[in-house]
Amino acid sequence: NAGVTQTPKFQVLKTGQSMTLQCAQDMNHEYMSWYRQDPGMGLRLIHYSVGAGITDQGEVPNGYNVSRSTTEDFPLRLLSAAPSQTSVYFCASSYSQGPFLPGNTIYFGEGSWLTVV
Amino acid sequence: QQQVKQSPQSLIVQKGGISIINCAYENTAFDYFPWYQQFPGKGPALLIAIRPDVSEKKEGRFTISFNKSAKQFSLHIMDSQPGDSATYFCAARGAGNMLTFGGGTRLMVKP
Protein backbone atom coordinates (compact mmCIF):
# COMPACT_ATOMS: atom_id res chain seq x y z
CA ASN A 1 0.00 0.00 0.00
CA ALA A 2 1.89 3.06 -1.26
CA GLY A 3 -0.56 5.68 0.04
CA VAL A 4 -0.13 9.05 -1.70
CA THR A 5 2.73 9.13 -4.20
CA GLN A 6 4.13 12.34 -5.66
CA THR A 7 6.61 12.79 -8.49
CA PRO A 8 9.04 14.35 -9.06
CA LYS A 9 10.57 14.91 -5.64
CA PHE A 10 12.71 17.83 -6.84
CA GLN A 11 12.46 20.02 -9.93
CA VAL A 12 14.12 23.20 -11.17
CA LEU A 13 12.29 25.19 -13.81
CA LYS A 14 13.08 28.30 -15.78
CA THR A 15 10.61 31.14 -15.74
CA GLY A 16 7.95 30.58 -18.36
CA GLN A 17 8.36 26.83 -18.57
CA SER A 18 5.45 24.52 -17.93
CA MET A 19 5.43 21.26 -16.06
CA THR A 20 3.17 18.76 -14.34
CA LEU A 21 3.43 17.47 -10.80
CA GLN A 22 2.03 13.99 -10.56
CA CYS A 23 -0.02 12.62 -7.68
CA ALA A 24 -1.44 9.14 -7.33
CA GLN A 25 -3.20 7.37 -4.48
CA ASP A 26 -4.05 3.71 -4.14
CA MET A 27 -6.57 3.97 -1.31
CA ASN A 28 -9.64 4.49 -3.52
CA HIS A 29 -10.09 7.95 -2.01
CA GLU A 30 -12.64 10.22 -3.61
CA TYR A 31 -11.25 13.47 -2.31
CA MET A 32 -7.86 14.76 -3.49
CA SER A 33 -6.22 18.13 -3.14
CA TRP A 34 -3.04 20.10 -3.74
CA TYR A 35 -1.41 22.40 -1.20
CA ARG A 36 1.66 24.57 -1.35
CA GLN A 37 3.84 25.16 1.67
CA ASP A 38 5.75 28.39 2.15
CA PRO A 39 7.76 29.45 5.22
CA GLY A 40 5.61 30.92 7.99
CA MET A 41 2.38 30.42 6.03
CA GLY A 42 1.54 26.81 6.69
CA LEU A 43 -0.07 24.97 3.81
CA ARG A 44 -2.47 26.70 1.47
CA LEU A 45 -4.99 24.92 -0.72
CA ILE A 46 -4.50 25.32 -4.47
CA HIS A 47 -7.13 23.06 -6.05
CA TYR A 48 -9.19 20.11 -4.95
CA SER A 49 -11.37 17.39 -6.40
CA VAL A 50 -14.29 15.56 -4.84
CA GLY A 51 -14.28 12.80 -7.44
CA ALA A 52 -13.34 11.91 -11.00
CA GLY A 53 -14.34 14.64 -13.42
CA ILE A 54 -14.93 17.24 -10.68
CA THR A 55 -12.43 19.91 -9.64
CA ASP A 56 -12.64 23.25 -7.87
CA GLN A 57 -10.41 26.11 -6.80
CA GLY A 58 -8.91 26.55 -3.39
CA GLU A 59 -7.32 29.55 -1.75
CA VAL A 60 -4.44 30.14 -4.21
CA PRO A 61 -5.41 28.71 -7.64
CA ASN A 62 -3.86 31.28 -10.00
CA GLY A 63 -1.18 29.88 -12.29
CA TYR A 64 -2.19 26.28 -11.71
CA ASN A 65 -4.45 23.87 -13.54
CA VAL A 66 -5.78 20.47 -12.51
CA SER A 67 -7.82 17.64 -13.95
CA ARG A 68 -9.21 14.41 -12.49
CA SER A 69 -9.80 11.80 -15.18
CA THR A 70 -9.46 8.84 -12.81
CA THR A 71 -10.03 8.27 -9.10
CA GLU A 72 -6.35 7.48 -8.58
CA ASP A 73 -4.61 10.42 -10.26
CA PHE A 74 -4.71 14.17 -9.69
CA PRO A 75 -1.96 16.01 -11.61
CA LEU A 76 -1.13 19.66 -11.00
CA ARG A 77 0.00 21.70 -13.99
CA LEU A 78 2.02 24.87 -13.88
CA LEU A 79 1.14 26.68 -17.06
CA SER A 80 3.94 29.26 -17.17
CA ALA A 81 6.20 28.99 -14.14
CA ALA A 82 7.04 32.11 -12.16
CA PRO A 83 9.57 32.59 -9.32
CA SER A 84 6.60 33.15 -6.97
CA GLN A 85 5.69 29.50 -7.53
CA THR A 86 8.90 28.33 -5.89
CA SER A 87 7.53 26.24 -3.06
CA VAL A 88 6.98 22.77 -1.70
CA TYR A 89 3.87 21.14 -3.08
CA PHE A 90 1.86 18.49 -1.25
CA CYS A 91 -0.84 16.28 -2.61
CA ALA A 92 -3.41 14.95 -0.14
CA SER A 93 -6.32 12.54 -0.23
CA SER A 94 -9.16 11.34 1.96
CA TYR A 95 -12.04 8.95 1.70
CA SER A 96 -14.68 11.61 1.40
CA GLN A 97 -15.52 15.18 2.27
CA GLY A 98 -18.33 14.21 4.54
CA PRO A 99 -18.73 14.93 8.25
CA PHE A 100 -15.77 14.25 10.41
CA LEU A 101 -15.16 10.54 10.84
CA PRO A 102 -11.90 8.74 11.52
CA GLY A 103 -12.12 7.27 8.03
CA ASN A 104 -11.98 10.77 6.58
CA THR A 105 -8.43 11.35 7.75
CA ILE A 106 -6.50 13.39 5.22
CA TYR A 107 -3.26 11.76 4.11
CA PHE A 108 -0.40 13.71 2.58
CA GLY A 109 2.29 12.71 0.11
CA GLU A 110 5.94 13.42 0.83
CA GLY A 111 6.10 16.59 -1.21
CA SER A 112 7.59 17.97 -4.41
CA TRP A 113 10.23 20.68 -4.07
CA LEU A 114 9.97 23.13 -6.95
CA THR A 115 12.38 25.96 -7.69
CA VAL A 116 11.67 28.45 -10.46
CA VAL A 117 14.65 30.50 -11.57
CA GLN B 1 -6.10 36.80 5.70
CA GLN B 2 -4.98 33.95 7.88
CA GLN B 3 -8.02 32.35 9.43
CA VAL B 4 -5.98 30.15 11.77
CA LYS B 5 -3.25 31.85 13.77
CA GLN B 6 -0.60 29.70 15.42
CA SER B 7 1.96 30.58 18.07
CA PRO B 8 4.79 30.45 18.82
CA GLN B 9 6.68 30.17 15.54
CA SER B 10 9.47 28.29 17.27
CA LEU B 11 9.84 26.58 20.61
CA ILE B 12 12.76 25.09 22.49
CA VAL B 13 11.99 22.70 25.34
CA GLN B 14 14.21 20.56 27.53
CA LYS B 15 13.77 16.81 27.43
CA GLY B 16 11.01 15.82 29.82
CA GLY B 17 9.36 19.22 29.70
CA ILE B 18 5.94 20.22 28.40
CA SER B 19 5.60 21.72 24.93
CA ILE B 20 2.57 23.94 24.38
CA ILE B 21 1.44 25.27 21.00
CA ASN B 22 -1.57 27.51 20.64
CA CYS B 23 -3.97 28.22 17.79
CA ALA B 24 -6.87 30.59 17.34
CA TYR B 25 -9.46 30.55 14.60
CA GLU B 26 -12.12 32.89 13.30
CA ASN B 27 -14.56 30.82 11.26
CA THR B 28 -17.21 29.28 13.50
CA ALA B 29 -18.18 26.90 10.68
CA PHE B 30 -14.99 24.87 11.14
CA ASP B 31 -16.00 21.39 12.30
CA TYR B 32 -12.77 19.46 12.86
CA PHE B 33 -9.42 20.52 14.26
CA PRO B 34 -6.44 18.29 13.49
CA TRP B 35 -2.80 18.69 14.41
CA TYR B 36 -0.15 17.55 11.98
CA GLN B 37 3.48 16.68 12.65
CA GLN B 38 6.03 17.19 9.92
CA PHE B 39 9.62 16.00 9.85
CA PRO B 40 12.14 17.54 7.43
CA GLY B 41 11.69 16.25 3.91
CA LYS B 42 8.40 14.56 4.70
CA GLY B 43 4.74 15.37 4.31
CA PRO B 44 2.53 16.31 7.26
CA ALA B 45 1.21 13.35 9.21
CA LEU B 46 -1.91 13.43 11.34
CA LEU B 47 -1.01 13.47 15.02
CA ILE B 48 -4.28 13.99 16.85
CA ALA B 49 -7.60 15.68 16.13
CA ILE B 50 -10.63 16.97 17.99
CA ARG B 51 -14.23 17.88 17.27
CA PRO B 52 -15.62 21.17 18.61
CA ASP B 53 -18.11 19.40 20.90
CA VAL B 54 -15.23 17.98 22.95
CA SER B 55 -13.10 20.09 25.32
CA GLU B 56 -10.11 17.79 25.59
CA LYS B 57 -8.66 14.77 23.84
CA LYS B 58 -5.64 12.81 24.97
CA GLU B 59 -3.61 10.25 23.06
CA GLY B 60 -0.52 9.09 24.86
CA ARG B 61 1.69 12.10 25.56
CA PHE B 62 -0.31 14.36 23.24
CA THR B 63 -3.35 16.33 24.42
CA ILE B 64 -5.57 18.80 22.59
CA SER B 65 -7.43 21.35 24.68
CA PHE B 66 -10.33 23.07 22.94
CA ASN B 67 -12.13 26.25 24.02
CA LYS B 68 -15.06 26.78 21.69
CA SER B 69 -16.22 30.07 23.21
CA ALA B 70 -12.76 31.58 22.89
CA LYS B 71 -12.21 29.97 19.47
CA GLN B 72 -8.87 28.64 20.62
CA PHE B 73 -7.23 25.25 20.81
CA SER B 74 -3.84 24.05 21.89
CA LEU B 75 -1.53 21.06 21.70
CA HIS B 76 0.29 19.89 24.80
CA ILE B 77 3.16 17.44 24.49
CA MET B 78 3.97 15.94 27.87
CA ASP B 79 7.40 14.52 28.70
CA SER B 80 8.79 15.96 25.47
CA GLN B 81 11.48 13.86 23.79
CA PRO B 82 14.19 14.71 21.23
CA GLY B 83 12.27 12.55 18.74
CA ASP B 84 9.37 15.01 19.02
CA SER B 85 11.53 17.67 17.36
CA ALA B 86 9.55 18.57 14.24
CA THR B 87 7.28 21.23 12.82
CA TYR B 88 3.71 21.14 14.11
CA PHE B 89 0.73 22.55 12.28
CA CYS B 90 -2.73 23.13 13.60
CA ALA B 91 -5.53 23.11 11.09
CA ALA B 92 -9.25 23.58 10.86
CA ARG B 93 -11.60 21.93 8.45
CA GLY B 94 -14.21 23.87 6.55
CA ALA B 95 -16.65 23.16 3.76
CA GLY B 96 -15.62 20.58 1.20
CA ASN B 97 -13.10 18.96 3.53
CA MET B 98 -10.77 21.90 2.97
CA LEU B 99 -8.14 22.40 5.64
CA THR B 100 -6.96 25.84 6.69
CA PHE B 101 -3.56 25.60 8.32
CA GLY B 102 -1.79 27.67 10.91
CA GLY B 103 1.68 28.97 10.11
CA GLY B 104 3.48 26.15 11.92
CA THR B 105 5.65 25.83 15.01
CA ARG B 106 9.16 24.47 14.84
CA LEU B 107 9.77 22.50 18.02
CA MET B 108 13.21 21.56 19.23
CA VAL B 109 13.56 19.31 22.24
CA LYS B 110 17.03 19.49 23.77
CA PRO B 111 18.50 16.33 25.31
Image (cartoon, coloured by chain):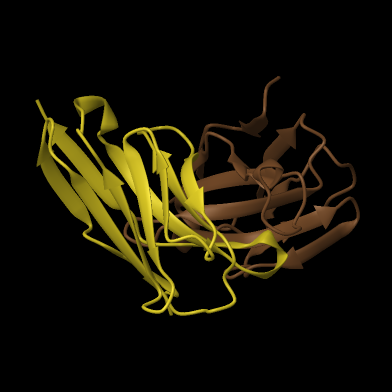
Total numbered circles: 0
Instruction: Using the image, determine if residue A80 lies above or below residue A72.
Output: below
Q: Residue at x 91, y 55 (%)?
A: A53
Q: Position of residue B13 (x, y in %)?
A: 12, 41
Q: Position of residue B11 (x, y in %)?
A: 16, 49
| Residue A66 visible in the picture | no
Q: Is residue A2 left or right of residue A86?
A: right
Instruction: Using the image, determine if residue B98 lies above or below residue A115.
Output: below
Chain identifier, yellow in the render: B
Q: Residue at x 77, y 51 (%)?
A: A96
Q: Is residue A94 left or right of residue B4?
A: right
Front residue (pair A113, A74): A74
Dividing the picture into quadrants, the one containing residue A70 is: top right
Instruction: Using the image, determine if residue B86 lies above or below residue A52.
Output: above
Q: Quadrant of the N terminus of chain A?
A: top right
Front residue (pair A103, A40): A103
Q: Position of residue B63 (x, y in %)?
A: 35, 46
Front residue (pair A2, B4): B4
Q: Is residue A33 left or right of residue B29?
A: right
| Residue A94 visible in the picture | yes
Q: Residue at x 20, y 27 (%)?
A: B82
User: What is the display colour for chain A?
Assistant: brown
Q: Position of residue B64 (x, y in %)?
A: 38, 52
Q: Residue at x 28, y 52 (%)?
A: B105
